[in-house]
Amino acid sequence: MKLEALVKSSVLTQPIYEPGKPIEDVARELGLDPAGIIKLASNENPWGPSPKAVAAAKVALEHGELYPDGGCFALRQKLAAVHGLGANQYVIGNGSNEIIELLGHVFLGAGDEVVFGGPAFVVYKLVTLLFGAKAVEVPLQQWRHDLGAMARAITPRTKLVFVASPNNPTGTANDATELLAWARALPEHVVAVFDEAYAEYLAPEAAMDLRPLIAEGRKVIGLRTFSKIYGLASLRVGYGFAGAELAGLLNRVRQPFNVNAIAQAAALGALDDREFAEKCARENRAGLMQIETGLRGLGLEWVPSVANFMLVKVGDGARVFGVLQARGVIVRPVNVYGLPEWIRVTVGKPEQNTRLLAELAVAIRRV
Ligand SMILES: *Cc1c(COP(=O)(O)O)cnc(C)c1O
C-alpha cells in the first residue's frame, strides 16, 4: 500500500508556504558574498531587537538546561500590566502564527467556513485548509478589507473571520472606528480575529482598541507579535488577547512548552524598551517616505502603506524579483497573492532603501 493512501486528504492538497529566502540560501545558490546581500522580504525590523531584549535573552541562555515556564507567567503578567487586562486573558504562542493554528484546533473541522480578505495573510488560508474547513476569500476593495462584503459572506457555517489591519501584503489599514462598529454588528456565532501584527507602526490615534469589545463579552481576539517592530522574528513569540474563556480554550490546546525561555526573556526585555520601539516606528515612517520619493522618481506605482512594507507595481513581478535577487536584494514576489505585477518590499535602513531603489532602477530597465 502506498503511504499516500494513509494520509488525510487535507494534507495531500495542503498548499506549501513559501517564506522569504534567507540570505545564506541566496548567497549559496547564486555564489554571492552574504555580506553584500540585503533582505527586504519578510517585514523584519532592520534595526534588530532592542539591546535590552538581547541582554535578557543572553541571561536566559545560561539556563538552557531547564524547561521554560510553560505558562509564560512573567510575560502574561507584564502584558496584562501594559494593557490593563488580566493575565488570564492571554495566550502566548510560538509566533502569532501558532495562535492562528490554535484557533483552528479549537474551532475548525470539516464543513466549517472561515472568512478572510483576498489578498490577506496567507496563513489564514493554510490553517483553514489544514483543518478541512472551507476558505471564503472576500476580495479587497481599493486595497482595504471590504467589511460589508465580509459580513455578507458569513453563513451559519462560518466559525472565524480574520481581519488584518494593517493587512499583509497590502500595508493598508481599515479605519479603527469602522472596524469596531463592524465587529459589534457581527452575528453571535462567529469569532472575529483581529491580526494586529503591524499595529505598533500605526499612529496611536489610528490603532484600534479591542479592549472595550472584550470587556463587553464579545467573541473577539487580537493577535500581536514580537516578530515585527520588536525585531525578534527569529525567536518565535507572539500572543493573543481575548476574554478569559477564549484565552483559556486556546491555552488548553497548545503544547506544554510551546514558547522557549530565551524568547520569553527577550520579549520581556523588549517590552521594557518603549523608546526603542518608538524609534523604530519613526524610522519606519521616514523610510516609507524615502521609498515613495524614490518610486516617484522611477515612475512606479505603489500602494500607500501604514506598515513596514509596501507593494510596488513593477510589471513582471517574478522577473524583477529574480533580477533584484541576483543583484543581492531579496524582496518578495506576490504572485501567490494573485498580484503577479507587484513585488512587496520591506522598509529597511536608509542606506538599504537607497540600495533597493538603485537596484530597482536597473531591474525595471532590463526587459
Ligand atoms: C508577520 C505576520 C505575523 C507574525 O507572525 P509570527 O508568527 O508572529 O512571526 C502575523 N500576521 C501577519 C499578518 C503578519 O504579516
Image (cartoon, helix red, strand yellow):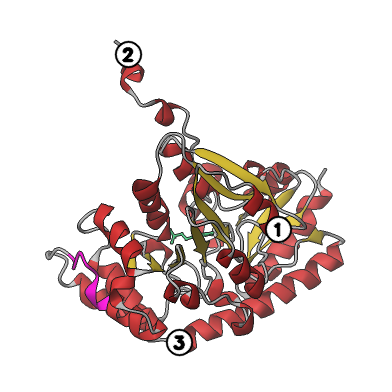
Q: Quadrant of residue 268?
A: bottom left
Q: Which residue is mark 2?
A: 2
**Mark pair 3, 2: CA separation:** 55 Å
Question: Which quarter of the rendering shows the N terminus?
Answer: top left
Question: Viewer-proximal residue, 194 or 293?
Answer: 194
Q: Is residue 290 left or right of residue 8?
A: right
Q: Do labels 2 and 1 touch, CB within 8 Å? A: no
On the image, the x and y values in percent for residue 269 come to: 34, 81
Secondary structure under tag 2 reads loop
Q: What is the number of callouts on the image?
A: 3
Closer to the chain start, of discs 3 and 1, is 3
Asked if residue 204 is positioned above or below residue 237 in the image, the reply reads below
Residue drawn at the location 63% of the way across and 46% of the way down: 153
Among the two numbered marks 2 and 1 on one chain, the one whose residue lies closer to the N terminus = 2
Which residue is disc 3 drawn over? Answer: 274
Number of residues whose C-alpha sits closer than 10 Å to that of mark 1, classed few (under 14), some (14–19) or many (20 or more): many
111 vs 126, nearest the viewer: 111
User: Would you say residue 225 sits in the magenta stretch?
Assistant: no
On the question of residue 18 being in view, the answer is: no
